[in-house]
Image (cartoon, rainbow, N blue to C red):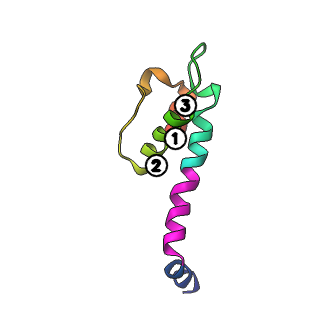
Amino acid sequence: WMTLGRIRKGGAALLFSLLLIPVLVGTWALQSQRCVPVGDEALGFMKALFTAVSAVTVTGLSLIDVGSALSQEGKWILL
């Protein structure tokens, strides 16, 4: 019961945090060199951010071709 009251009081902040934290972690992870095939350049901040937001919100939009621009590890992070 106490948890439900806390959620009602801080619902907007809780929802914002539940979306913001995975987006930031995903953006940081997608920018790493391990997420792209060997020899390719790492994703820039804006492409990684857009891709992370798209993954968290399940829109399916992407600025990159996920199949060729991400390594196997990058695809698992995106998933």
- Bounds of the magenta segment: 10-22
Q: Are circles 2 and 3 on residues that touch, CB within 8 Å? A: no
Q: CA distance from mark 3 to mark 1?
A: 14 Å
Q: Are circles 3 and 1 on residues that touch, CB within 8 Å? A: no
For the N terminus, which image quadrant?
Answer: bottom right
Q: Residue at x 52, y 41 (%)?
A: 49
The crowding category of the residue bearing disc 2, from other C-alpha atoms within 10 Å (few below 14, some 14 to 19, many at least 20), is some
Name the chief secondary structure element in magenta.
Answer: helix
Q: Which residue is mark 1?
A: 49
Q: Residue at x 64, y 25 (%)?
A: 33
Q: Are circles 1 and 2 on residues that touch, CB within 8 Å? A: no
Query: Which amino acid type corresponds to the residue marked 3 in the rendered image?
Result: Gly
Q: Which residue is mark 3?
A: 74
The crowding category of the residue bearing disc 3, from other C-alpha atoms within 10 Å (few below 14, some 14 to 19, many at least 20), is many
* Mark seen at residue 56: 2
Q: Secondary structure at mark 1?
A: helix
